[in-house]
Image (spheres, rainbow, N blue to C red):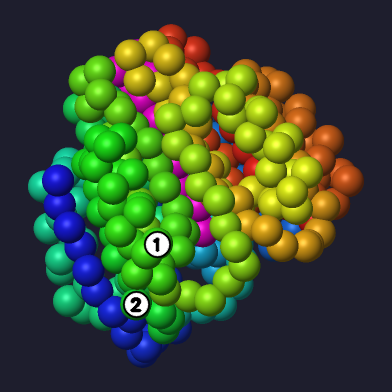
Amino acid sequence: MVFFNAKSISSLVVGGVLMIQAALTGVEGQAWRAHHGLTGAAFQTQFNNYVSQGYRLTHLDGYGLNNVAYFAAIYEQTSGPAWVAKFGLTSAGYQEQFDTLVKDGYRLKKVNGYSVNGSERFAAIWDKSSGAAWVARHNLDSAQYQAAFNTYVSQGYRLKHVSGYAVGTTAKYAAVFDKSAGPKFAARHGLTSAQYQAEVTKLKGEGYRPVSIDAYTVNGQNLFAAVWEQTTGPDWAARHNLTSAQFQAEFDRLVKLGFKLISVSGYGSGSALYAGLWTK
């Protein structure tokens, strides 16, 4: 269990800092790209292409299938502060990179834990944006994560992102909190597929919209962690338990209707399933 704490530092540089390579395919004529089912090598190669065209990595998800790591990612073609992304990090390697980058003025935007051959790995995105005080933690079991959540929320923090992953047969969690202002929010973790669907339906009826979703497999069981905010906004769509072909078909259908993919998560045992979140 590792504790991180850092305050934001203002951006000093504009442009991407190329420290990993990732991958994306996408929709012609649009300023964003998304792709899933990439091996590490394919992820590395395609990242070079998109960064050279002015794209920034905004979402990165790793998942292990048959002892092989795969990746799903989203890019946007936009300007912004300097940024760094890393993947394939051990817990110690992630801690080392975190300490170095925070010292250099970066703040963690997203961290994703995933399991390959029974060992945890981490992928993360940092940038030099300014903002509220923030904290991040990883390698917490369910009870430790819930205790950390309760503590930080009581201190005025909001959960920005949570990722579940397996270490052996135990579910572990990595999360990012900050003290930014915002609407009322709700967060859940360790949900089965049926429980997750019930929460989506219930919270939608109470005026909440999902802003982050992560799916993960522990001891053969598919689980879900998500964050919702009670706010109005454009239409949204959430899907889960889709095969690769089903996810691609739904992606194509929703993009034609004007939706944009903002979160994608791979999971499963043997063959991949996908959960996604779109908004207009």
Return the residue found at the far front.
154
Q: Give the range drawn in magenta.
A: 58-69
Considering the whole magenta stretch, tell me its main secondary structure: strand
Q: Locate residue 240 relative to residue 19 in the image: left or right.
A: right
Q: In percent of the image, x 49 and y 13: which residue is there?
A: 271
Q: Where is residue 87 in the image (x, y as percent from the top left)?
A: 30, 46
Three-letter residue code for mark 1: Val
- SS category of the residue bearing label 1: helix
Residue occupied by mark 1: 153
Q: Tell me which corner region of the image, top left, top right, bottom left or bottom right, holds residue 121.
A: top left
Q: Where is residue 54 in the image (x, y as percent from the top left)?
A: 55, 69
Callout 1 touching callout 2 (CB < 8 Å): no
Task: Give the distance between the C-alpha atoms of the residues marked 1 and 2, in whole angstroms.
Answer: 13 Å
Q: In percent of the image, x 15 and y 68: which residue is there?
A: 100
Q: Nearer the viewer, mark 1 or mark 2?
A: 1
Q: Tell me which corner region of the image, top left, top right, bottom left or bottom right, holds residue 31.
A: bottom right
Q: Is residue 18 visible?
A: no
Would you place residue 247 above or below residue 175 in this image? above
| Earlier-in-chain disc, 1 versus 2 | 2
Instruction: Between residue 99 and residue 198, name the one nearer to us.
Output: 198
Q: Position of residue 98 (x, y in %)?
A: 20, 62
Give the position of the C terminus as an image quadrant: bottom right
- SS category of the residue bearing label 2: loop
Q: Would you call the spot at circle 2 few (<14 residues within 10 Å), some (14-19), or many (20 or more)?
A: some
Marking on residue 133: 2
Q: Where is residue 44 in the image (x, y as percent from the top left)?
A: 38, 45
Q: Tell me which corner region of the image, top left, top right, bottom left or bottom right, holds residue 221.
A: top left
Instruction: Between residue 129 and residue 132, name the one nearer to us.
Output: 132
Q: In percent of the image, x 45 and y 64: which residue is there?
A: 158
